[in-house]
Structure formats: C-alpha cells, structure tokens
Image (cartoon, grey):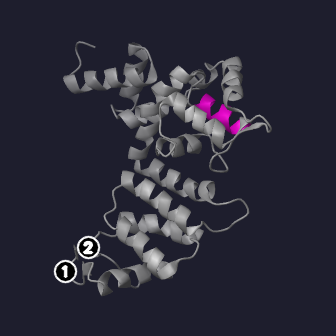
C-alpha cells in the first residue's frame, strides 16, 4: 500500500472503514473497479461470501427484537425502535434507501422476508454492522442510476395499499425529501403549484416524468420543449412559472 498515491490510499482506508474488508480485499476490489468507490462497494456487497457470511440466528434475533407483538411483521413502532438503535432520525432519507434494499412493499412495514433478505444482501447480521454500513447505504444516493431506482421505488412504497395514485401530501413530502438530496431549484415552486392549482393525487406517470424533467430541463427552462411528450401537469407547471414571473420567459433565469 505504501506504493500507492495519496488519493488511492485514502480510498483504500475509506473502503476498509465502511466495509470492514481486509486491506488485500479492498485493494483487489478497488483495482477491479478502476478505483471508483461506488462501483467497488457494489462489487464487494454483491459477492456471495459477503451475503453468506451473515449468521441466520443473529438475523432471527434481530428480527424478533423489532417484530410486532401481534403480527409476524415489523411495524411502525418496531421501525422507530430500530431507528433509535441506529441513532438515525426516522425521517432520514437513509431509511428510504434501507427500505429499497429490503424491497419493502409498504412504508413503515417490513415482512420477515424483506427484513432478513435485505440485511443478508448487505452482509448485516448485527446492529454494529448495520451502523457501519449506513455510510455506504447513504452513498447509494450519489449514484444517478441508483437514485433513479430509489425514486421510482418510492412511489409504490409510499402510496396507500390498494390505491393507484399517491396522495398529494405524501407526494410533496417525498419530493422534498428526495430533491433535498438531488438538488432541484424548482422543487418548492412545484409543490406550491400543486397545492394551489392541482390539489389531487399524483399519478405514476407524473411521478416518473417529473424526475426526467428535473434532470433533463435546466431550472431556467431554456431547453424546455413545449412540444415534448410531458404530462399535462408539467406543461401547466411551466405556464405557472412564466405567468407568475418565477421564470423570465426567453431569458432562462429563475427569479
């Protein structure tokens, strides 16, 4: 390791600190990933030996610690206790990423299969390991493709059971959470527009297309194509921005 440059040494130390891997394993995975930390994490945690290294008895104990008294699931109270044990705010976006890893069907609920399977995929079988993995779990939001997957996942996860659309208040809360991470200057204007002009549940199409709009159209709308196949709600939002002089039409500036 002494032969490595400072940047590479720092990455090795960071990788070891987050994963608990040996120096040899860290070097091997980082070199295979061309020294990209995010790619190295993905490779490391996808290795069968990491997943199989978890102790099923420890996972069972962990699950039972948070399981509801009356049903074989972890419910809101159990998740609150888990957050306390992890020293994480329940509203922290990292818990959304945890739920994505667990493939959770519903907000504030984990089935045994979801909980155990998600922790196995992360190589976690103790609270200590869970705390150690949190920086890696949070770092998944920095990967554009992973962020998109988490964003799409959030729609079904957050909507009420049996409903096709996402309640407006819930959608606004999720957008504020997600776009606080993936900075979008127009998020507050979007939420205000919905409350003033829409006041209805959000469809899956609108949810999905808004991310494409936020990523692909600059905040000044200079590259916005009025003939593009945007949902009507996004077209109305653009009109709202210009009519209220939030955007100076033709100048591409946000006021």
Overall secondary structure of the magenta stretch?
helix
Q: Residue at x 41, y 51 (%)?
A: 144
**At 44% across and 64% down in the image, what residue appears?**
211
In the image, the segment drawn in magenta is 113-121
The residue lying toward the viewer, choosing from 158 and 34, is: 158
> Label 2: few (<14), some or many (≥20) within 10 Å?
many
Q: Nearer the viewer, residue 27 or 70?
A: 70
Q: Quadrant of the C terminus?
A: bottom left
> x, y (%) of residue 122?
56, 30
Residue 220's spot in the image, x, y percent? 26, 73
Disc 1 and disc 2: Cα gap in Å? 8 Å
The question of residue 118 being in magenta is answered with yes
- Against 128, residue 36 (above or below) is below
| Residue 191 location (% of width, % of height) | 43, 69
Count of marks, rendered view = 2
Quadrant position of residue 214: bottom left
Q: Find the residue positioned furthest to the bottom.
A: 243
Instruction: State the residue at coordinates (67%, 60%).
Output: 160
Do the residues bearing badges 1 and 2 touch, measured as CB atoms within 8 Å? yes
Quarter of the picture containing the N terminus is: top left
Q: Which residue is mark 1?
A: 251
For disc 1, the neighbor class at 10 Å (few under 14, some 14 to 19, many from 20) is: few
């Amino acid at each position: 390791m002494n032969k490595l440059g400072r940047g590479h040494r720092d990455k090795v130390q960071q990788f070891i600190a987050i994963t608990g891997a040996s120096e040899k394993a860290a070097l091997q995975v980082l070199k295979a990933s061309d020294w990209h930390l995010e790619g190295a994490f993905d490779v490391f945690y996808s290795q069968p030996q990491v997943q199989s290294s978890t102790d099923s008895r420890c996972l069972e104990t962990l699950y039972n610690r948070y399981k509801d008294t009356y049903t074989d699931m972890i419910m809101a109270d159990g998740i609150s206790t888990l957050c306390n044990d992890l020293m994480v705010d329940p509203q922290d976006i990292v818990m959304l990423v945890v739920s994505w890893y667990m493939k959770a069907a519903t907000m504030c609920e984990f089935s045994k299969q979801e909980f155990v399977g998600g922790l196995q995929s992360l190589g976690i079988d103790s609270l200590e390991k869970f705390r150690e993995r949190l920086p890696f779990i949070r770092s998944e939001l920095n990967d554009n493709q992973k962020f998109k997957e988490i964003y799409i996942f959030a729609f079904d996860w957050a909507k009420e059971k049996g409903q096709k659309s996402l309640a407006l208040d819930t959608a606004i809360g999720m957008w504020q959470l997600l776009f606080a991470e993936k900075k979008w200057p127009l998020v507050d204007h979007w939420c205000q527009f919905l409350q003033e002009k829409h006041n209805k549940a959000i469809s899956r199409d609108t949810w999905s297309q808004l991310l494409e709009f936020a990523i692909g159209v600059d905040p000044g709308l200079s590259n916005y194509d009025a003939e593009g196949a945007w949902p009507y709600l996004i077209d109305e939002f653009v009109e709202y921005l210009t009519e209220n002089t939030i955007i100076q039409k033709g100048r591409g500036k946000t006021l």
